[in-house]
Image (spheres, grey):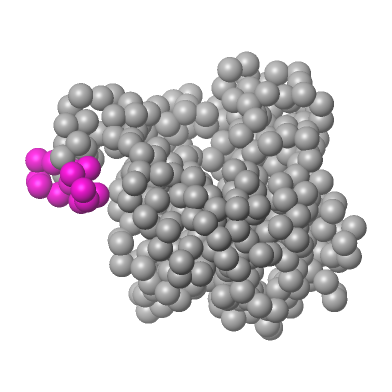
Amino acid sequence: MNKIAGIVAEYNPFHNGHAYQVEQARQHGAQAVVAVMSGHFLQRGEPALADKWRRAGWAVASGVDLVIELPQAIACRSADYFAAGAVRLLNALGLITHLAFGAESSYDTLSPLSRLVPEPATQAALREGLKQGLSYPAALEAAIKKGAPHLAPALRCPNNILALSYLNALRLYAPAIAPLVIPRRQSAYHDRTITGTVASATAIRATLQAQGLAPQLEAVVPSATWQGLQQCQAEHRLHLTTAPLDRVLFYKLRLDKLDGRLPLLGEGLENRLEKAINQTNGWDGLLDFLKSKRYPRTRLARQLTHYLLNTPPELLHRVDREGPPYARVLAFNDTGRQLLHACRKQAGLPLITRVAPHLSAGADPFLAACLRQDVKATDCYDLLADTSAPPCGSRDLTTSPLYLR
């Protein structure tokens, strides 16, 4: 295969916009599509709507050939680290020729922007904006305005922010992979309403939370996703709230407070956290109490997720330096099976289909530590299940990749 497109995604859930992206990649000549997908806790620090195997299966049933898991140590990170880790993983497979991603602006706008962002003057202005309490997008827009005011408005679009992170990651870690920018159509990233046949994942989740499996949802997702959502609902496996984790989180926080081990978040935030433990209830209440201009909800949610999963800070630092140490297979079809055969010969890192051997004595310590975070995330995520569907433990050790013939 001469042209293989990589996609970085969460598929939360896989919808018609994602199917359009895959279709566009093929129309641009891709003979196969490989997705690197977040597992059970996502980039914004939230649990996924459905488990990673189901979501990967919906993607493969709807046009993706192979789904690789983005390790938890990378999946729950800010945009630059998220993009860098995912791009390095795709590059290490040894097969990817193009990275397909959606954006509100064209490559002609994004390319000069991506070259401006790393400039020392831009970075200095960005840091100054962050110190003043601006959000990252607002601080970056203000920094770009000083040198290229005509490009700055593009930074008000959330997909463009992530697109710039992808372009920077490609330049740093995978210069041989060409960018393939696919314009978003109809629904915007944060839209919460559903009209027509294309809706954002945000709108789909909001509708599910407010109305359940409302009829209009069937029009905006492929049939595999619609059937999968119905099955998840019947099995009490649609996770639309963190409520079951609230008591676990607060129990851990209160124990660590008594033992003097509260996470040090800096700049007085640890003092506010100590107060919040006794004055709030639940994940959302805690985030509302702690949030500020300097610490937006998403940043705090990521920190709380890593706290809940006991993520060692040194592991995050090492992953940032060295990149992901493995490629974990979640789902594939016949074309994906051919890709896996090729990966075994060409990949620059281990290809994992069975987890247990990589956690045993004698396994690579870095790989095992990173993989252990995926196992923890699954075990924690399964506590979200409704009490009428008791969660099982250690599913990562017993669940095989899905092969959709």
Most common SS among magenta residues: loop
In this rendering, position of residue 333 left or right of residue 374: right
Residue 151 lies in what quarter of the image?
Answer: bottom right
Residue 339 lies in what quarter of the image?
Answer: bottom right
Q: Judge whether residue 357 can be spotted in this image.
A: no
Whether 328 is drawn above or below 265: the answer is below
Residue extending furthest toward the bottom: 345
Residue drawn 46% across and 49% down? Answer: 139
Nearest the eye: 188 or 48: 188
Nearest the eye: 205 or 235: 205
Residue drawn 34% across and 29% down? Answer: 288
Q: How many marks?
A: 0
Quarter containing the N terminus? bottom right
In this rendering, position of residue 120 left or right of residue 6: left
Q: Where is residue 229 in the image (x, y as percent from the top left)?
A: 67, 31
Quarter containing the C terminus? bottom right
Residue 32 lies in what quarter of the image?
Answer: bottom right
Q: Where is residue 99 in the image (x, y as percent from the top left)?
A: 71, 64
In this rendering, position of residue 266 left or right of residue 201: left
Whether 256 is drawn above or below 344: the answer is above
Residue 294: in magenta span? no
Residue 268: in magenta span? yes
Q: Judge whether residue 213 can be spotted in this image.
A: yes
Residue extending furthest toward the top: 211
Please report the bounds of the magenta region as a residue range. Answer: 257-270
Residue drawn 90% across and 58% down? Answer: 27
Residue drawn 73% across and 34% down? Answer: 187
Q: Where is residue 37 in the image (x, y as percent from the top left)?
A: 61, 54
